[in-house]
Image: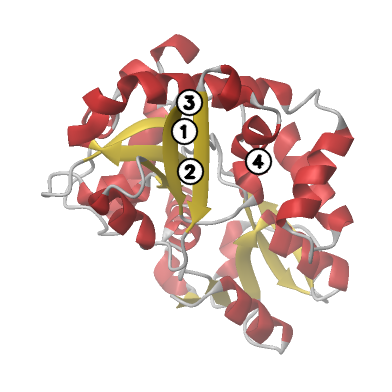
Amino acid sequence: MDKLTISATANGLNYLPEYLADQEGLFHDTGLEVTAVARDPWTGVLDDLETGHADIALGGLWVPAMYAGSERELSVVCQLNHQFPMAIAVRDGSSGDFALEDLLGKVVLAPGAGGSAPYEFTAGLLREAGVDPAGIRFVRDLSTAMLVELFTSGLGDAIIADLVTATELEASGTARIVFRHLDDGGIMPNSVYYCRTERVAELRDRISRFVAGIDTAMRLVPTVDPHTVDDILKRRWPEKDQGILREAQRQMAASAVWDTVAIDETASDRWMRILAEGGLVRSAPSYAFLADDSFMADYR
């Protein structure tokens, strides 16, 4: 049995296909023993790749993008999320239809301790809608837990949150979800697997089998026994309301978030353009520069 180690930036519901593949023995069926650990702070994944404690990392595409052209050469081998499973919730009491321009003049909490994507991708959507993000006061760079506590205590008019957290806020009566990135954000290669470029040749066979396992798990998600998913939810998030977790999982499964392991090149270019507009990259790296498409070609 060959070993493959993963260092992940979080333990997230949007990573469900990996957890399902592990539980159902899909990696084992390909001759792989896969082990994974979630790092806090998330930047530990970069250390793990550097020291060799991990073979591949799981996290946002924006990280390999920011390092593109630097001495830290990273190659993306496939994606786990085809969309961005976040939402915007506004304070309870607001009513009526919502448009992104309604955030103008408001205070919006945008967690950033786990990465820049919640703000940066939302800011990109604002610009695409003709809304200048400078007209909105963003509270950024703090953890989700801290900003949720502050929002619940009265800070801000809206919050950008992962789908589980947004659903929790809505269930508590604190806020109302008015925008789901899954519904209105289009295709976006969110969470991806990447490794040090110098190790691609060494890891090629193991990564190819790993990608096949993830692909099988993605196709299994819509038809898997609900009790199997419940077992994963209870084991990984025993402290969470299981009904809320199941509802968030249902929404993700009904979307395109787990449609394919293959990154959409047009969607990648769009995300890179958004990052370039935000100043996170020196120039928008092309898909060909970021990814080794040989791992994804068979899944297009």
Of the residues shown, which amino acid type is indicated by label 4?
A: Leu
Which comes sooner in the sequence, label 3 or label 1?
1
Using the numbered discs, state the Cα–Cα distance from disc 4 to disc 3 in whole angstroms.
15 Å
Are discs 4 and 3 less than 8 Å apart at CB? no
Q: Residue 133 at x, y = what percent?
A: 43, 66
The residue that label 2 is drawn on is 190
Query: 10 Å neighbourhood of mark 1: few (<14), some, or many (≥20)?
Result: many
Q: In this view, does 13 lie to the left or right of 3?
A: right
In the image, which disc is placed on residue 210? 3
Mark 4 lies on residue: 16
Residue at image coords 22%, 53%: 281
Relative height, residue 148 to residue 243 (above, below)? below
Q: Which numbered dot is residue 10?
A: none
Where is mark 1, residue-wise?
Answer: 79
Observer-nearest of 153 and 258: 258
- Which marked residue is nearer to the observer: mark 2 or mark 4? 4
Q: Are marks 3 and 1 in contact (CB under 8 Å)?
A: no
Task: Tell me residue 81's x, y (percent).
Answer: 54, 37
Q: How crowded is mark 4: few (under 14 residues within 10 Å), some or many (20 or more)?
A: many
Residue closest to the far top: 298
Q: Which of marks 2 and 3 is in front?
A: 3
